[in-house]
Amino acid sequence: MSRSTDSAAAPSQPLTLLSIVIPARDEEGCIAATIEHLHLELRLHHVPHEIVVVDDGSTDNTWQILQRVAAAMPELQPVRNEGAHGFGRAIICGLERIRGDGVVIMMADESDDCRDVVAYWRTLNQGWDCVFGSRFSRGGGVIDYPLLKRMINRLANWFIMGVFRISLNDTTNAFKAYRRTAIEGCRPFLSPHFNLTVELPLKSIVRGYTWTTMPITWRNRRTGTAKLKLAEMGSRYLFIIMYVWLEKYFSRGDYRRASVLAGAPPPVALPATGQADVERSGSTPHPAA
């Protein structure tokens, strides 16, 4: 598919296929359950989908498990990241393989709720370019979040909210949804590690893609070990935050979405299909900046 947004579908056009990109490294204890629960939830709600799991240099049996599950699940596409490793690189590797016009980035450790993926799909289909989940908005929640990590998370997100003057209060969370046109509009990607989770939403906002928020739930992993190392990532997060801030104020619109530069009005979201959808998503609209 072309990466040019000039020939992209209109933002209000219904999506046809949801691609879920899951980076995985040494996740043999949970990857099968993550995929199977996700696949079941999407099938129950009749969401056309593919699941792209990127093995990012696992040294355990993650790849063998993916091969076994894929043999019985045509929707699963296991991919090996044969290049340099890193959380961001694994996601980018997965984005290069997707076929869908909608994308959700999800963790491999079952910390993200499969029901929220369905809510993402429905909200994207209301016409939004991006849907950003928040664990800290009304209706969201966290379970077993380590206190120190939570404090650092809130400080980092408050800093981002102040620097960019946005209401999104959970920018650093990876679990988000995008139309493919928005993903392509965020290129080139700069972040090889967890800072990609900040690069994608901030670029989407700064470059003029429409976005909304919805509450999501998160629970700490029950198997394996966390891959995020706060001591290593602080300067990398700051780098990408400042990079996008400089783009916002000094690039003179060189990277803005074409329709925004042309003065076209932002798309109008389609009405929700039912009260249950409204109550589940609790989305808050934000037109193109």
Image: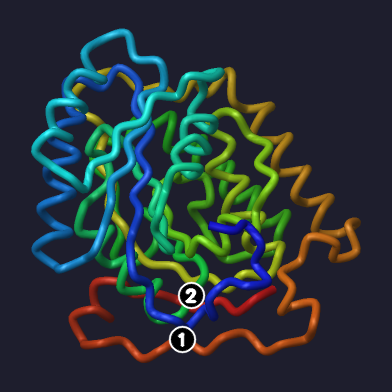
Q: How many marks?
A: 2
Pointers 1 and 2 in contact (CB under 8 A)?
yes
Crowdedness near tag 1: few (<14), some (14–19) or many (≥20) residues, C-alpha within 10 Å: some
Q: Earlier in the sequence, mark 1 or mark 2?
A: 2
Left or right of 254: which side holds 52? left
Residue 141 image position (x, y, % from top left): 29, 53
**Of the residues shown, which amino acid type is indicated by label 1?**
Ala
Mark 2 falls on what kind of element? loop
Label 1 element class: loop
Q: Which mark is residue 165?
A: none
- Judged left or right of residue 215, residue 35 is left
Residue 183: percent from left, percent from top: 56, 56
Marks 1 and 2, Cα distance to the nearest angstrom? 7 Å
Horizontal and vertical percent for residue 195? 58, 36
Q: From where the camera sits, is residue 39 visible?
A: yes
Question: Residue shown at 21%/52% (left/top)?
Answer: 114
Image: 220 above or below 170: above
Residue 286 appears at what percent x and percent y?
Answer: 56, 76
User: Considering the image in quadrants, where does the C terminus appear?
Assistant: bottom right
Disc 2: which residue: 128
Q: Which residue is mark 1?
A: 269
